[in-house]
Amino acid sequence: MQILKNLPFFNVVATGVASLSLPLGMTYERIILELGGTAFTKAMITDLKAKLNGKVIWQTTGAKLDLLNKFRGLATDASHLVMDFTEIFARDEVGQSLGAIGTADGVGSFTLEVTITGATAPTLESWSVLSGPKKLSVINKLLSYNVTLGAAGKFPIQLPYGNQGGSIIKRVGFFNSYMTELEVKKNGLVIHDTKKVINEYFQTENRRVPQAGLYVADFIVDNNQSGMLVTADAQSMQWNATVSQADVITVQVEYLDLLNNL
């Protein structure tokens, strides 16, 4: 494994989109962003995208990614933000590297786009954690969907899971203000049904770190990768969220998936 500094971002300005083209050949396990300057916080990263062959494979914000990282128990501080394509706490070596992005074959471009809003004289640098070359295969994706629920109650939320045999879902984060429960059904059978406090109690037992305003359905909470939600045999998937009053929810789904499936 190597840790190498990347080339400088282009167009690091107070308000605008900074971009970086990453070299190809190695396998990307993690990318570490370092924020600096007079005033530049994670909250000022209002959009963060990773693109492979021009296709968005990651989309989040600085603040939301920071919460997800804290939930997983990753190191966080004010100046650093990690894009983790792996599972560093998995129980075996193969599981740890699942989702890492191989660029030795099948990849023409790998780029990052960081939208900065309201910073003052910002600086932005990055480092890549790399392993040996491998061709493009199943990769980690983090995709975002917005849902508006107009009243209190239990409501279905539709989440895509691909059309080429079904994506594999690692965890789903619901960024919310008033969500209290979640029920998940696969082919009509309930596979997850719990209120927030019990969900978080169980996650804490497994050394996750629950965050305010975030409900996570974590299918690999015990770090056994075999627990991932396989949708290849799903004729139907239902995600039923209960909210105590009207809410706007941003859902971020972490997948293992083929590049062109979603």
Image (cartoon, rainbow, N blue to C red):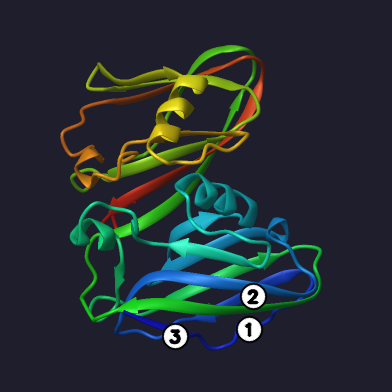
Instruction: Look at the numbered disc 2 and give the secondary structure of its residue.
Output: strand
Amino acid marked by disc 1? Phe
Residue at the spot 66% in from the left edge and 19% down from the top edge: 246
What is the quadrant of residue 203 in the picture?
A: top left
**Front label number (2 vs 3):** 3
Amino acid marked by disc 3? Leu
Residue at the spot 40% in from the left edge and 28% down from the top edge: 202
Counting from the top left corner in percent of width and height, residue 238 is at 35, 23
Asked if residue 251 is positioned above or below residue 9 in the image, the reply reads above
Mark identifier at residue 167? none
Counting from the top left corner in percent of width and height, residue 251 is at 51, 38
Query: Which residue is farthest bottom?
Result: 7
Instruction: Tell me which label, 1 or 2, sits earlier in the chain.
Output: 1
How packed mark 2 is, by other alpha carbons closer than 10 Å (few <14, some 14-19, many 20 or more), is some
Are the residues tagged 1 and 2 within 8 Å (C-beta)? yes
Q: Specify whether 24 is left or right of 151.
A: left
CA gap between label 1 and label 3 equals 18 Å
Query: Which residue is farthest left?
Result: 233
Asked if residue 190 is positioned above or below residue 40 in the image, the reply reads above
How packed mark 1 is, by other alpha carbons closer than 10 Å (few <14, some 14-19, many 20 or more), is few
Instruction: Look at the numbered disc 1 and give the secondary structure of its residue.
Output: loop
What residue would you read off at disc 3? 4
Asked if residue 193 is positioned above or below residue 78 in the image, the reply reads above
What is the quadrant of residue 130 in the picture?
A: bottom left
What residue would you read off at disc 1? 10
What residue would you read off at disc 2? 18
Instruction: Look at the numbered disc 3 and give the secondary structure of its residue.
Output: strand
Q: Toward the viewer: 158 or 126?
A: 126
Instruction: Tell me which label, 1 or 3, sits earlier in the chain.
Output: 3
How packed mark 3 is, by other alpha carbons closer than 10 Å (few <14, some 14-19, many 20 or more), is few
CA gap between label 2 and label 3 equals 20 Å
